[in-house]
Image (cartoon, coloured by chain):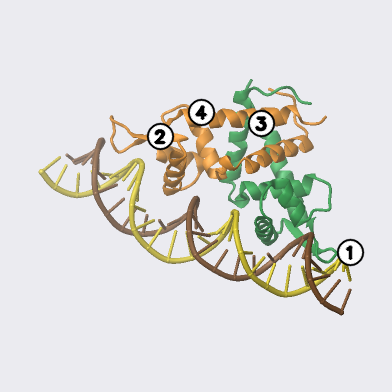
Chain colours: A green, B orange, C yellow, D brown
DNA sequence: GCTAAATGGAACGGTTCCGAAACGAATTCG
DNA sequence: CGAATTCGTTTCGGAACCGTTCCATTTAGC
């Protein structure tokens, strides 16, 4: 576990990374979409619409729409589950992995630059 | 400066805090509004619409609307500058300070819980 | 004084998102 | 088999946000 963050450092970190995301027009994902994206790329598969909706505490259509948008951006892909064809399995993509990796780089860089 | 974050830790931190914000319906601020709020509460005053627009790299009306929304939520207040009455000075509020403080607490808590 | 520049805001049209409700397809259960 | 359940999606009306453009007010320059 890293060393404890002080309040001013925690807020500065959140501010700096958020500012980077706002300025980088490519990443205009909402908080909800961000949570969906990171859950898919950090938690163990398989991921379903229903599972994501429960994990985030939002309705199913909200997840469907978030996946629509992120699918259009190429960040995730959807596939019918052959075993139970009611289910849709959400899968990772190369572009999504790169976007997540880039976010990680931003957080690390901004964290490294935090003042004492 | 805190110890270096590893990529998996940086992404987990961003995911966990974002998830807290999504689940806490009160904080349905967009990334842009979040950046405005934190800039106001972290950077030195005075803050103007034009200055914020430049700092965030967005248009003036976007800042005006963000301030409208956040003013409605009681997170900031606006005042005409008596010295130059063209300017509007954005000021902090008690509710805004509390909201920012709560965000800091979330970031610190999620950071503290990061796995090795 | 009078024009020119600067500032914040309002109006407009378009896009996106929301939750609730309804729906089609697939599966399970009686 | 037939009814009930599950799952993801679509539809609907409403709300929020976007950038562009234009405007009222105020200040600065001549």
Residue A13, visible in the rendered structure: yes
Q: Chain of mark 4?
A: B
In which quadrant of the rendered view does residue B101 lie?
Answer: top right
Residue identifier under label 4: B97
Check if mark 3's residue and mark 2's residue have beta carbons within 8 Å. Answer: no
Q: Secondary structure at mark 4?
A: helix
How many labels, in total? 4
Gap in angstroms between the C-alphas marked 4 and 1: 51 Å
Depth-wise, is mark 2 or mark 1 nearer the camera? 1
Residue at 76% x, 29% y is B113
On screen, A33 above or below D1? above
Residue identifier under label 2: B77
Could you tell which of marks 4 and 3 lies nearer the N-terminus?
Answer: 4
- In the depicted view, which residue is nearer to us: A2 or D8? D8
Q: Is residue B25 left or right of residue B68?
A: right
Q: Residue furthest top?
A: A116
Residue count near mark 4 (Cα–Cα under 10 Å), binned few <14, some 14–19, many ≥20: some
Residue identifier under label 1: A83
Q: Is residue A70 left or right of residue B116?
A: left
Q: Is residue B24 left or right of residue C4?
A: right
């Amino acid at each position: 576990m890293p060393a404890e963050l002080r309040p001013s450092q925690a807020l500065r970190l959140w501010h700096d990374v958020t500012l980077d995301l706002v300025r980088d027009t490519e990443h205009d994902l909402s908080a909800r979409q961000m949570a969906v994206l990171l859950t898919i790329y950090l938690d163990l598969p398989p991921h379903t619409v229903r599972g994501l909706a429960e994990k985030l505490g939002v309705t199913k259509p909200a997840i469907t729409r978030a996946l629509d948008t992120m699918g259009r951006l190429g960040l995730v892909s959807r596939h019918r589950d052959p075993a139970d064809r009611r289910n849709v399995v959400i899968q990772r993509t190369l572009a999504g992995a790169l976007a997540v990796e880039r976010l990680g780089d931003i957080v690390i860089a901004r964290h490294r630059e935090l003042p004492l």
